[in-house]
């Protein structure tokens, strides 16, 4: 099973880097969690950081506005992060749960690397909000936004139109803002491309 979340790694200058990323769980009901597989593209900053530092922190969150901002690179200022005793990485204060990871093996034989990690520490900050269709829609829209260079615009736009119905029906203000941000990003990426709408 793949759990979508936010991964923090340390940049070369020591500052935190955030990226939305899926974590493949060996056994989702195993408590405590022991192993997590990350599958970052080798072109990603997260992959470079994992390779250099051998560590990351995976966060479970229901904050889809933060996830959307990170997905489109508009996460300035950074959310509050902290260090924890015995943990090398950066922990997002507002995440529901976090797992500090130590890289065990890296398989870089494919463009999407397989980074097997051991969970070295875990923590719980607050409850998970629960199911909400608009949050789910924003999550899907965020994935689409990170694929603007891979998928045809019309396909992305069509999927966004379907997801917009869920946002209309069930969103709170943060989900609305997140969805608008993603829609704008997709549109601007299209307009700025050769063959896009802009002159
Ligand atoms: C919910 C979600 C899950 C994602 N999962 C992955 C993933 O497992 N691997 C990956 O390479 N990119 C994934 N992406 C896309 C990356 O976040 C995106 O390409 C990002 O630019 C790469 O991170 P970077 O900032 O480390 O370069 C995901 C995006 C979203 C919104």
Image: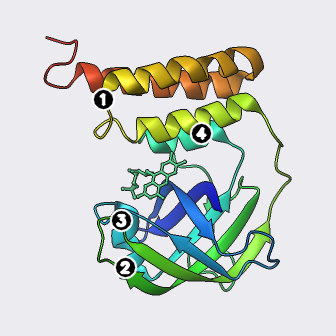
130 or 77: nearer the viewer:
130
Where does the C terminus fall, quadrant-wise? top left
Q: Is residue 198 above or below residue 110?
A: above
Label 3 or label 4, whichever lies nearer to me, is 3
**Real-space Cα separation, disc 4 to disc 1, in angstroms:** 19 Å
Whether pointer 4 and pointer 2 mark residues with C-beta atoms closer than 8 Å, the reply is: no
Q: Quadrant of residue 123?
A: bottom right
* Labels 3 and 2: the sequence-earlier one: 2
In the image, is the residue at mark 3 within 8 Å of ligand 1 by its beta carbon?
A: yes
Q: Secondary structure at mark 2?
A: helix
* Labels 2 and 1: the sequence-earlier one: 2
Q: Which mark is residue 112?
A: 3
User: What residue is disc 2 on?
Assistant: 51
Q: Position of residue 54 (x, y in %)?
A: 45, 83
Colour convention of the picture: rainbow
User: What residue is disc 1 on?
Assistant: 152
Judged left or right of residue 60, residue 39 is left
Whether pointer 4 and pointer 1 mark residues with C-beta atoms closer than 8 Å, the reply is: no
User: What residue is disc 4 on?
Assistant: 139
Q: Position of residue 46 (x, y in %)?
A: 40, 64
**Real-space Cα separation, disc 4 to disc 2, in angstroms:** 27 Å
**How dense is the environment of label 4, judged by Cα within 10 Å: few (below 14), some, or many (20 and up)?**
many
Q: Position of residue 93 (x, y in %)?
A: 70, 57
Where does the N terminus fall, quadrant-wise? bottom right
**Real-space Cα separation, disc 3 to disc 1, in angstroms:** 21 Å
């Amino acid at each position: 099973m793949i759990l979508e979340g936010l991964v923090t790694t340390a940049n070369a200058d020591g500052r935190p880097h955030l990226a939305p990323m899926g974590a493949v769980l060996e056994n989702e009901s195993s408590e405590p969690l022991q192993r997590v597989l990350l599958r970052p593209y080798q072109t990603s900053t997260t992959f470079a950081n994992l390779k250099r530092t051998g560590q990351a922190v995976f966060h479970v969150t229901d904050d889809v506005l933060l996830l959307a901002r990170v997905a489109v690179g508009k996460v300035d200022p950074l959310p509050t992060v902290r260090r924890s005793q015995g943990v090398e990485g950066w922990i997002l204060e507002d995440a529901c749960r976090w797992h500090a990871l130590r890289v065990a093996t890296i398989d870089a034989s494919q463009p999407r690397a397989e980074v097997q990690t051991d969970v070295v520490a875990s923590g719980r900050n607050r409850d998970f909000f629960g199911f909400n269709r608009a949050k789910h829609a924003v999550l899907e829209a965020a994935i689409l936004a990170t694929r603007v260079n891979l998928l045809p615009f019309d396909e992305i736009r069509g999927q966004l139109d379907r997801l917009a119905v869920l946002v209309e029906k069930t969103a709170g203000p943060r989900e609305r803002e997140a969805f608008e941000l993603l829609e704008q990003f997709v549109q601007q990426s299209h307009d700025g491309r050769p063959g896009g709408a802009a002159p």
